[in-house]
Amino acid sequence: MKHIVMWKLADDDSKAENMIKIKNGLEGLNGKIDGMRSAEVGINVNGSDMAFDVVLVSEFDGAKALDAYQKNPLHLEVASFVRSVAVERRVVDYEN
């Protein structure tokens, strides 16, 4: 199962630093959560107003593994930070 999330972050002095923290936090979960196959985070280089700032592309063994990831304390810690700096979020989950 693929889990893709995009965020727009608050436009403040710490935006670039926050994007790096999100990337490091989410990619740091690789190999630490059962059923999570991979997580890759991209930081957008497109300056368009319509563009999102950060994207997560992750893969799981299935819907149950994704559900377990979303409840995992390691993920919840990173997600708490992301929620504190994000102003908009979009998500797509699909079977591959």
Image (tube, grey):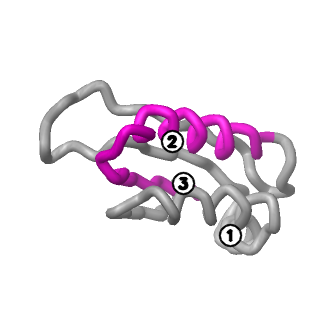
Closer to the chain start, of discs 3 and 2, is 3
Which residue is depicted at the point 52% across and 53% down?
A: 96
Distance from disc 3 to disc 2, alpha carbons, whole Å, reads 24 Å
Number of marks in picture: 3
Disc 3 on helix, strand or loop?
strand
Residue position marked by numbered label 1 in the rendering: 70
Give the label, 3 or 2, closer to the camera.
2
Distance from disc 1 to disc 2, alpha carbons, whole Å, reads 21 Å
Which one is in front, 41 or 17?
Answer: 17
Mark 2 surroundings within 10 Å by alpha-carbon count, few (fewer than 14), some (14 through 19), many (20 or more):
many
Q: Is residue 21 above or below residue 1?
A: above
Residue position marked by numbered label 2 in the rendering: 18
Question: Furthest-front residue in view?
Answer: 13
On screen, residue 65 versus residue 8, left or right, reads right
Q: Is residue 20 above or below residue 91?
A: above
Which residue is depicted at the point 46% across and 56% down?
A: 85
Chain part drawn in magenta: 1-30
Which residue is depicted at the point 34% across and 32% down?
A: 44
Q: Is residue 67 above or below residue 79?
A: below
Which residue is depicted at the point 62% across and 65% down?
A: 80
Which one is in front, 92 or 21?
Answer: 21
Q: Amino acid at mark 3?
A: Lys
Mark 1 surroundings within 10 Å by alpha-carbon count, few (fewer than 14), some (14 through 19), many (20 or more):
few
Position of the N terminus, as image quadrant, is bottom right
